[in-house]
């Protein structure tokens, strides 16, 4: 890498006496581009996931051409190395433009090649590039054996390209809306394997006909130098919607908490229920229906059905070994415990180092969390696979209200990439389907507390009363969801274990999820640490 003195001697625009089509073979260009330009550019991007670590250097792992006739763009696979001795891989497509007025905010560097001055930009800013990728997907040949592989679903007949635009403020990926009907998601952080989002989307919609996920339409992947298929982009149908279920639930819960005052409800008189008790709508007491309204429970039943139908589809495969159901094993137990104990120790360290940022109930709960660390660790260690009779499946893996779209009176499930902290291999490990259910229950819990935190001044009740009402409501949400989900999944012979086994797995997975959440909240929003801490304590204090 050039030193600081060398860097200052290089003047912009950078000048190279090579054609654009041969630029990536120029070692001088690659050296300057990686060490001086990309290090500064990459760390500023929304999709860059290494902001909490110290970048050491960037290597060009490999590159490939994305082209059609005379149009040539480059897809770069970048290896970002960190001082902490780990690395991440990113996809960056680049284009050369000579128009001075174009992409002023998105230029990577000024450049002169063969006497023509211009700029290298992220190619996704160029409509011609987006059009090219779309057209290559819809005209893709079956059994493509080239290194850059385009694929389209036999269920999709693509219309001629008309227009495209960015979808919105995403974090880890960049999605482009094509013709107002399709979405191409370009994966920014990539892995040397097929992306789970691609695998799950194609399996559910194309193979199993599952109707409540955006239908798979096509993809772009490359065969890397190790002969591994790496997913670069996924194209799906655009589902017109009214937003995600997280925003929907926050609006509904605000109405529910406002009803405490509107209906003169005494929180101490609200009937309670045990966590995980299965409840039909008729089992929910009239006082709760009067307070929360019937509609929110009917919506939870619909969401539970869509979740069960997803797991039924995922549990009905007996040919593709990547999706066939399997039992619990000793190897799975070892993998699970090692992973969770490592994560738990990390969270313990985070809480101990950030206690000074907490106060009131959050501080009390954090101290209790530390005092009961051995009890929590024992919960994770007490996973005995020999006592479990249910099956493991490929699951969503990061299932929460934000991964669900609301369309009219229905829900559509999306974003099957898996848990962000997990390796690509871990994301594909078959899990009990109740892991997804546990993730959704944690999301309900979050929605209840987020509503309180965001609107506390609007409700003339103490924080303690609001928390108490919220915990009661949460347990009814869980009960109604459980009844609908378990009833449907058992009718379709998906084995999720007997009653006590189900409760054990739910408690185990919810504890895992709450501990996972605790790290984010302690680092980003200490005020909200009360939510996962409450979740942890409610699981520890539940005896049955």
Image: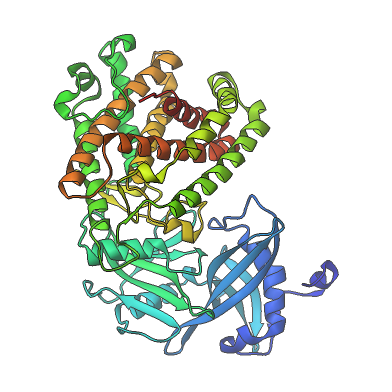
Q: Is residue 378 left or right of residue 310?
A: right
How many dots with numbers? 0
Q: Look at the image and tell me whether residue 104 can be seen.
A: no
Please, which colouring scheme is shown? Answer: rainbow
Residue at x 58%, y 86% (from the top left corner) = 20
Quadrant of residue 274 within the rendered picture: top left
- Could you tell me if residue 478 is visible in this image? yes
Vertical relation: 445 (above or below) 79: above
Q: Quadrant of the C terminus?
A: top left
Name the spot of residue 356 as percent of width and height, x first.
67, 26
358 over 313 or under it: above or below: above
- x and y percentages locating residue 297 in the rendered image: 22, 32
- Depth check: 528 or 278 in front? 278
Specify the quadrant of the image occupied by residue 174. Answer: bottom left
Percent of width and height locating residue 176: 39, 64
Residue 144 horizontal/vertical position (percent): 36, 85
Q: Is residue 218 left or right of residue 384?
A: left
Q: Nearer the viewer, residue 12 or 391?
A: 391
Q: Nearer the viewer, residue 223 or 177?
A: 223
Q: Quadrant of the N terminus?
A: bottom right
* Quarter location, residue 183: bottom left
Q: Residue furthest front?
A: 386
158 vs 367, nearest the viewer: 367
Left or right: 128 with respect to 85? left
The residue positioned 76% from the left and 75% from the top of the image is: 11
């Amino acid at each position: 890498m050039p030193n600081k003195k060398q860097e200052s001697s290089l003047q912009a625009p950078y000048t190279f006496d090579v054609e654009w089509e041969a630029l990536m073979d120029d070692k001088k260009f690659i050296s300057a581009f990686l060490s001086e330009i990309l290090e500064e550019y990459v760390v500023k991007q929304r999709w860059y996931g290494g902001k909490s670590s110290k970048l050491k250097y960037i290597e060009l792992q490999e590159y490939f051409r994305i082209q059609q006739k005379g149009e040539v763009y480059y897809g770069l696979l970048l290896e970002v190395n960190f001082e902490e001795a780990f690395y991440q891989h990113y996809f960056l497509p680049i284009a050369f433009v000579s128009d001075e007025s174009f992409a002023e905010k998105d230029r990577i560097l000024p450049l002169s090649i063969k006497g023509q001055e211009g700029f290298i930009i992220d190619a996704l800013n160029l409509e011609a590039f987006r059009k090219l990728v779309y057209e290559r997907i819809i005209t893709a040949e079956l059994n493509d054996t080239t290194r850059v592989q385009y694929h389209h679903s036999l269920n999709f007949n693509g219309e001629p390209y008309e227009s495209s635009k960015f979808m919105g403020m995403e974090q880890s990926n960049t999605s482009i809306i094509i013709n107002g009907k399709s979405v191409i998601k370009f994966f920014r952080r990539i892995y040397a394997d097929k992306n789970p989002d691609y695998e799950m989307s194609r399996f559910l919609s194309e193979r199993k006909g599952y109707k409540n996920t955006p239908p798979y339409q096509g993809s772009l992947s490359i065969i890397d130098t190790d002969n591994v298929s790496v997913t670069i982009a996924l194209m799906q149908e655009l589902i017109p919607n009214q937003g995600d279920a997280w925003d929907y639930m926050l609006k509904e819960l605000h109405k529910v908490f406002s009803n405490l005052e509107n209906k003169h409800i005494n929180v101490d008189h609200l009937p309670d229920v045990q966590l995980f008790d299965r409840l039909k709508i008729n089992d929910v007491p009239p006082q709760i229906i009067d307070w929360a309204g019937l509609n929110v429970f009917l919506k939870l039943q619909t969401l539970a059905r869509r979740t069960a139908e997803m797991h039924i589809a995922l549990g009905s495969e007996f040919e593709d070994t990547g999706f066939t159901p399997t039992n619990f094993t000793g190897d799975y137990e070892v993998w699970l415990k090692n992973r969770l104990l490592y994560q738990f120790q990390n969270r313990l360290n985070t809480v101990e180092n950030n206690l000074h940022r907490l106060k009131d109930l959050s501080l009390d709960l954090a101290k209790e969390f530390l005092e009961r660390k051995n009890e929590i660790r024992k919960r994770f260690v007490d996973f005995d696979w020999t006592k479990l009779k249910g099956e493991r499946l490929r699951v969503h893996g990061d299932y929460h209200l934000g991964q669900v779209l609301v369309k009219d009176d229905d829900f559509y499930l999306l974003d099957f990439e898996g848990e962000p902290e997990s390796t690509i291999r871990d994301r594909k490990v078959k899990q009990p389907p109740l892991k997804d259910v546990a993730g959704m229950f944690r999301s309900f819990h979050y929605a209840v507390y987020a509503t309180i935190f965001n609107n506390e001044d609007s409700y003339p009740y103490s924080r303690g009363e609001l928390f108490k009402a919220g915990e009661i409501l949460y347990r009814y949400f869980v009960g109604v969801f459980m009844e609908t989900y378990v009833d449907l999944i058992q009718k379709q012979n998906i084995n999720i274990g007997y009653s006590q086994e189900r409760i054990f797995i739910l408690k185990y997975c919810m504890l895992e999820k709450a501990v996972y959440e605790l790290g984010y909240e302690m680092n980003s929003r200490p005020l909200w640490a009360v939510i996962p801490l409450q979740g942890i304590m409610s699981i520890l204090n539940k005896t049955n």
